Image: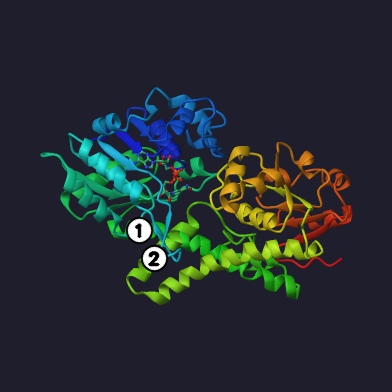
Amino acid sequence: MPVNKICCIGAGYVGGPTCSVIAMQCPDIRVIVVDKNKDRINQWNSDLLPIYETCSWPAAITLSEEPGLEKIVFCCRNRNLFFSTDIEAAIKEADLIFISVNTPTKIFGEGKGRAADMKYVEEAARTIATISTSSKIVVEKSTVPVKAAESISKVLRANQKAGVTFEVLSNPEFLSEGTAIDNLINADRVLIGHNDTPEGKDAFEDLCSIYTRWIPRDRIIGTNTWSSELSKLASNAFLAQRISSINSLTALCEITGADVSEVALAIGQDHRIGPKFLQASVGFGGSCFQKDILNIVYICECLSLREVAAYWQQVIDMNEYQKERFTKKIIETMFHSVSEKTLTIFGFSFKKDTGDTRESPSITVCKRLLDEGARLHIYDPKVFHEQIINDLVYATRDPEKVNKSVNIFSDPYTAANYSHAIVICTEWDEFINLDYSNIYYSMKKPAYIFDGRKILDHQDLSLIGFEVFTIGKRIDK
Ligand code: NAD
């Protein structure tokens, strides 16, 4: 059955960009992205989109220069791409529905247990079942625990109207924030898990027929549903594991005189290993890595696979250790106290080229510094000021302290003025080429730089007069 109308439930970092690209590549398909969050939908319908995404791959698509998310949305919106809060109407008219809602981590058992909170997925499935008056293909886009499609099918079957059927596919999203449009247009692979039944195979072909408009057929992988669900969790777990592995060597490097960048280069040149995700840092963040590993840990614990759970838990523990170690290093270096001192934080998003702050290492570092009595000046090129304050109030549970001790700035030079130290928490390109001589002269002395992302030229900074610390390298004076 050809797909003419698509509905996507969830207008977030996945639903918004994914459906924008589908709308751009399939002008004959009507795509409606719905969300229960009115503000978010209003933003998608405004000139200031809720998500910032560029694209460095103009040749691949039909739009003219700078084909970032903004350009795509402005081009397709109200032609074949719509953003709406009318969830029921969009479900009713769709042939295919993506469930792209959030699946955050749920804490239970006196704070000890962590698992994926499936309440939004379940809510979406219930709405689909009760509203639908015709048969639909329901596609899990959200990252979910293995076997979630079984629970979704159960909810759909239990609530469906007579004569209506649902076929559930798993089609996890592998985009990475900051490069989402590139990833969607030139996907390494599209994974589609389906039932091994005639209906399952037909639904698989229907979804394939959308992606093959711009993705070569041999990049589309068809698997059983459970392999697809587990592959998504495992992909993120492997990426996070590489970061924790390289980070696990940084303390050793700082003590012995080895340089973690040289070690990473030497390791990565081995074609069996490769160079990606070997950049040592203050730690990984983002809404997915930790959540997806916790998901594996939880499933393994439920299945009494204790050793497997402990193995993956260690990846997260190493990440926590790294954030804590970095902050401790800052405090120790500054005469064992940052109380009443001003530290300028460069970067608050969890990585460059996104305004997303979820699980950002900056939050942990800022919270610890505030706990120690520091005053913070924060500058990030893309994160909304209000978001920074909200994150820190949530992390510290102390709005008064945040109001008193945190100032947000719109330019890095003013932020650095009269501060005792610069702390690089996000690897934004613009931090590389700042005029650090100028910054040095505006700061209190001794002036420190703590480079949590290893992006600066440390020799140059030392020559200017800075006291420099960088992850994974001893800097001899
Ligand atoms: P998000 O929080 O940015 O967006 C989810 C949206 O769903 C929210 O706007 C929320 O209001 C909406 N929503 C929740 N329940 C709803 C309902 N019943 N009806 C209508 N709207 C509803 O989340 P995201 O970052 O887009 O992630 C979505 C899923 O994709 C998650 O499972 C995530 O793990 C996965 N994923 C995320 C990324 C990423 O980089 N962010 C990458 C790959 C996969």
Q: Quadrant of residue 36?
A: top left
Please count the marks in the image: 2
Residue found at x 71% / y 47%: 405
User: What is the x, y in percent for residue 377?
Assistant: 73, 45
Residue 198: x, y in percent? 16, 50
Q: Is residue 421 left or right of residue 249?
A: right
Question: What residue would you read off at disc 2?
Answer: 298
Mark 1, ligand 1, within 8 Å: the answer is: no
The N terminus sits in image quarter = top left
Left/right of residue 264 with respect to residue 13 in the rendered view: right
Q: Which is nearer the N-term, disc 1 or disc 2?
A: 1
Of residues 359 and 255, the one nearer the viewer is 359
Residue 318 or 457: which is nearer the viewer?
318
- Pinpoint residue 35: horizontal percent, then vertical percent: 38, 35
Q: Amino acid at mark 1?
A: Pro
* Residue found farthest to the left: 162
Assess whether mark 2 and mark 1 are in contact (beta carbons under 8 angstroms). yes
Say which of 338 and 457 sits in front.
338
Disc 1 designates what residue? 145
Question: Which image quarter holds the C terminus?
Answer: bottom right
Q: Amino acid at mark 2?
A: Tyr
Q: For this view, does 98 lie left or right of residue 292?
A: left
